[in-house]
Image (cartoon, helix red, strand yellow):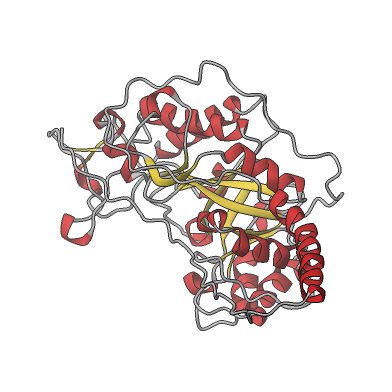
Amino acid sequence: MQRRTNAQPKIRRYKKIYHKANFRPVKTVLFIVGLVAIFFLSWSLYRPIISFFSGDFSSVPEVSDSTDSELSHPESNPEPVAPPEDLPDDTSIRAVYMPIDLLYDSDLLTDFVDTLTRNNINHVMLDIKNADGYLTYISELNALQNSSVIMNGAISNMQDTVALLHAHGFGVIAKIHVFRDPAGSRSDYDKAIHYLDSNLFWLDDSPENGGKTWLNPCSQRARDYVLSITEEVASMGFDIILFDDVRFPGKLGSAYTDYGVEVTQENKDDYLKEFISQASQELSSYDTEIFISSPAADSLSADPFSYGIKPVLLASGGYAPTLYPADYDSALSPYDAVEEQLKQLAPYLSSDAGLPFLPLLQAFDGYTYDDIFQQVSALADAGFDSYVLYSEDGQYDFPTVSYP
């Protein structure tokens, strides 16, 4: 069994520069009275802001590696946190991706939330298990105490954070990367894909090219690991869980994989469907929806190697494809790129299919308000009014008016 020291991502910190004011040595009584009045006025404005951001967004010290034992749920499972009943009666989802970093800076978070409100955004999406496999919150699962899969600077009160966002009218989406999970697979050899006839972790590329380990989609131990995290996240009150990377690795190096069972192109979807079915059963007592996310191109491909079938057919609960123009045809306008993908997906998105649809739209690579508006307009013209705007750094070129 190989082990390595996890190089964990660092949380960016935002710093403010404060300037000290110089006062003249002579102060009149009138000036003092004025200062007192200003102080009480400032305090009256300060308290509501502080109460909005009263969560303890503290970071945690670096954690050491641990050997995970068999996963079990917390001794006492918390009751699901229901969204407030007075949320607007609006079934459409207009969401943006919110970087975890923003939860550490109340000034930036205040500005961000204010901007979302002014632009008619009603949901935010947070990375909960990121593409490197790290959890962005401190888990209470027994097997994950002091585990190497907890990110440095993880949120210590995620349930309170979700409740806070709910209280201010936002639904909250948890994004979980499922089988593409370098941190989780490295923490337990029995959960990982191996090389054939060896006891070595399989990598999806050479070490020189940054090859990563994966969780084994055929391993019940690996599935239980993700399912335990999923149920814990649902218990925190998240409205939607968006599963990404519900798939096998790509073709590169696939001839050398050992899944512990025979895997063919014809039976890959059986293992993926089994995971999704188990997730649905685990969350049956929670008011949480499940969406499956993948690049739209994977569902448009004639040979979806990583899935066995078109991933849209795996999405029994809801489908959340990425419709990024940059991944489809950068020569097309944003409107045309989204429109073309929607036309090809149309057989799966008809009213008869009844599949909830929550596409991710591009807001990165310098995309302006016009670029974003074109994508949203293409959705609206096709009869869809829900979407997630995605920008990894949380920078969005919002207009002064609402999107349609």
Left or right side of 153 for 156: right
Residue 92 occupies quadrant: bottom right
Vertical comparison of 333 with 125: above or below: below
Q: Which residue lies furthest to the top in this view?
A: 75
Question: Residue drawn at (65%, 54%), measured in percent from left and top?
Answer: 124
Among the 4 quarters of the image, the one containing residue 314: top right
Q: Can residue 223 be seen in this view?
A: yes
Q: Where is residue 378 in the image (x, y as percent from the top left)?
A: 70, 72
Q: Please state the total of marks drawn on the protein image.
A: 0
Q: In which quarter of the image is the N terminus?
A: top left
Note whether residue 402 is visible. no
Q: For the point 78% across and 65% down, which residue is it? A: 36
- Furthest-left residue in this view: 198
Q: In this view, does 213 lie above or below 230?
A: below
Q: Is residue 251 left or right of residue 231?
A: left
Does residue 64 sit above or below 319 in this rendering? above
Q: Nearer the viewer, residue 134 or 365?
A: 134
| Residue toward you, 140 or 49 | 49
Q: Is residue 78 left or right of residue 139?
A: right
Among the 4 quarters of the image, the one containing residue 388: bottom right
> Foreground residue, 162 or 22?
22
Residue 10, percent from left and from top: 37, 56
Q: Position of residue 19 (x, y in %)?
A: 55, 76
Q: What residue appears at the point 29 percent right and 31 percent down from the top-left corner? A: 262
- State the quadrant of the C terminus: bottom right
Where residue 287 sits: x, y (%)?
A: 71, 33
Q: Residue at x 36, y 20 (%)?
A: 70
Q: Which of 342 and 245 is in front in this view?
A: 245
Look at the picture and state if 195 lies above or below 356: above
